[in-house]
């Protein structure tokens, strides 16, 4: 059986758990990282030299990096609705997967660390504001992409939606000023109807 190593509050672990829910894929999960530690233990580093989560063990095949894991699982289990075989459709999804990792993720992370992980007296308002502005700019790009389409890559839910949706959930939980982004808000609410999103993403931000 597929084993997922990583705490369920990690955004990167949530990506994989949500995908497994979409595919009705059975798995076992083990808490590693954050308050559970063990991610710097030699045994774990032998699986994932970065010491990060998630890592999967799929009947002896070990893989890390959440987006590589999502692509692998979708391909292995024939989830073409989520990651199609057509190369152009797949590339259109892949660019938004990468955008989630290189644009919106880095934009919102400083705000998450300040608001959620840093005691109030030690928070840096300038860092929060800079991150808020970067995230708003990134979501402006997403707002334009969602104009005239219900999901990031087109008419149906795909892997392209998962990374940005997790960060967007966090964005709507933070006590910050948010610009009016009606397409993003409608997409966010649409995703909230999905069982996997409700189960694996809409959790306390710890």
Image (spheres, rainbow, N blue to C red):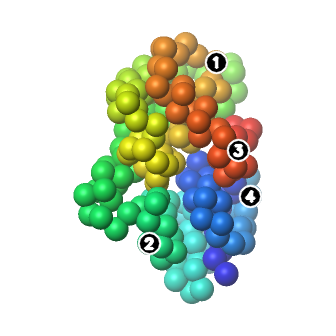
Query: In which quadrant of the rendered image does the C terminus lie?
Result: top right
Query: In which quadrant of the rendered image does the N terminus lie?
Result: bottom right
Label 3 crowd bin: few (<14), some (14–19), many (20+), radius 10 Å: few
Comes first in the chain, label 1 or label 4: 4
Comes first in the chain, label 3 or label 1: 1
Question: What secondary structure is found at the residue carrying circle 3?
Answer: helix
The residue where tag 3 is placed is: 198
Residue at image position (49%, 49%) is 157
Residue 116 seen: yes
163 or 10: nearer the eye?
163
Q: Which quarter of the picture shows residue 20?
A: bottom right
85 or 113: nearer the eye?
85
Q: Nearer the viewer, mark 4 or mark 2?
A: 2
Comes first in the chain, label 1 or label 2: 2
The x, y position of residue 181, in whole percent, is 47, 19
Q: Nearer the viewer, mark 1 or mark 4?
A: 1
Assess whether mark 2 and mark 4 are in contact (beta carbons under 8 angstroms).
Answer: no
Q: Is residue 85 above or below residue 196?
A: below
Question: What secondary structure is found at the residue carrying circle 1?
Answer: loop
The residue where tag 4 is placed is: 36
Q: CA distance from mark 3 to mark 1?
A: 21 Å
The residue where tag 1 is placed is: 175
Q: CA distance from mark 4 to mark 2?
A: 31 Å
Comes first in the chain, label 4 or label 2: 4
Comes first in the chain, label 3 or label 2: 2
The residue where tag 2 is placed is: 75
Question: What secondary structure is found at the residue carrying circle 2?
Answer: helix
């Amino acid at each position: 059986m597929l084993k997922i190593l990583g705490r369920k509050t990690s955004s990167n672990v949530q990506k994989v758990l949500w995908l497994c829910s979409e595919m009705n894929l059975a798995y076992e999960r083990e808490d590693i990282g954050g308050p559970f530690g063990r991610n710097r233990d030699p045994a774990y580093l032998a699986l994932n030299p970065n010491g990060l989560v998630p890592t999967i063990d799929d009947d002896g095949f070990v893989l890390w990096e959440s987006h590589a894991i999502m692509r692998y699982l979708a391909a292995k289990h024939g989830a073409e609705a989520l990651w199609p075989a057509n190369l152009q459709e797949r590339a259109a999804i892949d660019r938004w997967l990468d955008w989630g990792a290189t644009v919106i993720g880095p934009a919102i992370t400083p705000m998450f660390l300040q608001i959620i992980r840093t005691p109030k007296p030690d928070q840096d308002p300038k860092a929060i504001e800079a991150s808020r502005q970067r995230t708003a700019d990134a979501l402006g790009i997403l707002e334009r992409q969602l104009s005239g389409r219900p999901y990031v890559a087109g008419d149906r839910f795909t892997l392209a939606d998962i990374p940005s949706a997790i960060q967007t959930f966090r964005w709507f939980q933070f006590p910050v000023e948010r610009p009016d982004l009606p397409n993003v808000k409608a997409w966010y609410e649409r995703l909230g109807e999905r069982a996997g999103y409700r189960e694996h993403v809409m959790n306390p931000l710890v």
